[in-house]
Image: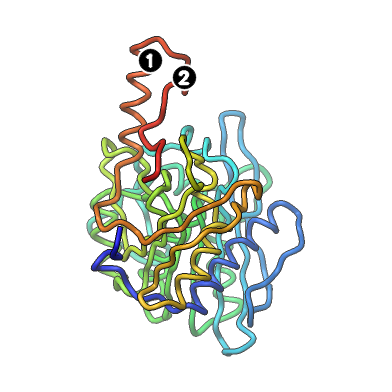
Amino acid sequence: MSAIPATQPLLPPQLTLAMAAASIAAYAAYEGKPVSAPSDYRLVARWSGWDGDPLGGSEELFGLLFRSTATAGTYLFAFRGTDSDLDIYEDLDFSTTAFVPSARTVTPVPQVSAGFYGIYNGRGGAMRASMRAQLFALLEHFAPTQVYVTGHSLGGALSQLFSLDLALSRPGLPSRNINFCSPMVGDASWEQVYAAHIAAADSTRCYNYWDYAPSLPPSTFGYASVGQAFRTAYDVNGAWFPHLLARHSIANMQIVLQHALWQTPQAWSGTFADQTDPQRLMRSQIPPTTPHPAWADMALTARAAEQALGFPEGAAASPAAATP
């Protein structure tokens, strides 16, 4: 692995790191911990979403709004995701539903994950307004002139729904999305509409080559990634089996980006403490130039082999077990 992908975009270090910090802050708020705003930003609002489940679901905190203290009219929307439990994706509804913008119609009608869209557009219990309604109410209240949108994991998926809604419903409002470790959100119709209304330079998905989540859902669902891709590559040093949370962690991604983004080219080789388990050592490498592996498809194949051989679920080795 001696060269970064030829199509790797150049990211603005300060903005990208502010977005990573905002994504981490969204987790802290959800967990009831002190919130540290990104440098040159101040927390001004929060919003919730409906997290449905077979028992009914609940209203939960899903994001934070930060106002720039350096540039008037600039606001950063940060969506909270899933940093500590990837099992959520096993139960999430990846069947598709129509994405309907807040203020207009679009052709073709984008088909997106019913699970993601349910969080973005759904309302239950005593919830007064959907996440979408809260977000557009914040736009009305603060009247931004520049919007940045971010999120990690599930939050990255929600951030992309909001970004397309912004592009379609508020086409005159400048916005940019930089998200982290996001699964795919919708099928080819979603990809087509997203590309038609959001310039590639205004939507970037940062991901780890070894992370499982960006390959979700499996290819049988026909989903597609959107925006330009910025690839990193880090894993537990000398790992003999996949440490999925370490590969997916936004805190680990943040450390890699803190080193990589100031380099030319924007890549970093080095070691650091695993933020999910400080007793482990992580190694960041120059990203491979080969296509991103279909980890989700390989996991399905491995699971089918386990069942055919009579192993308990998860007992056999994962196809993503080793790192070169």
Q: Residue at x 33, y 49 (%)?
A: 186
For this view, does 269 lie left or right of residue 19? left
Q: Mark 1 touching mark 2, by CB under 8 A?
A: yes
Viewer-nearest residue: 90 or 2: 2
Residue type for callout 2: Glu
Q: Which mark is residue 85?
A: none
Circle 2 residues within 10 Å: few <14, some 14–19, many ≥20: few
Instruction: State how far apart marks 1 and 2 are (Cα).
Output: 7 Å
For the question of whether residue 121 can be seen, the reply is: no
Q: Residue at x 30, y 68 (%)?
A: 8
Badge 1 or badge 2: first in the primary sequence: 1
- Please tell me whether residue 240 is drawn above or below residue 309 in the rendered image: below
Residue type for callout 1: Gln
Q: Residue at x 48, y 43 (%)?
A: 238
Q: Which mark is residue 313?
A: 2
- Please tell me whether residue 44 is drawn above or below residue 115 in the rendered image: below
Q: Residue at x 43, y 37 (%)?
A: 93
Q: For residue 38, what is the image quadrant?
A: bottom right
Q: Secondary structure at mark 1?
A: helix
Viewer-nearest residue: 170 or 259: 259
Q: For residue 135, what is the image quadrant?
A: bottom right
| Residue 70 x/y as whole percent | 61, 89
Number of callouts? 2
- Residue that badge 1 annotates: 307
Q: Secondary structure at mark 2?
A: loop
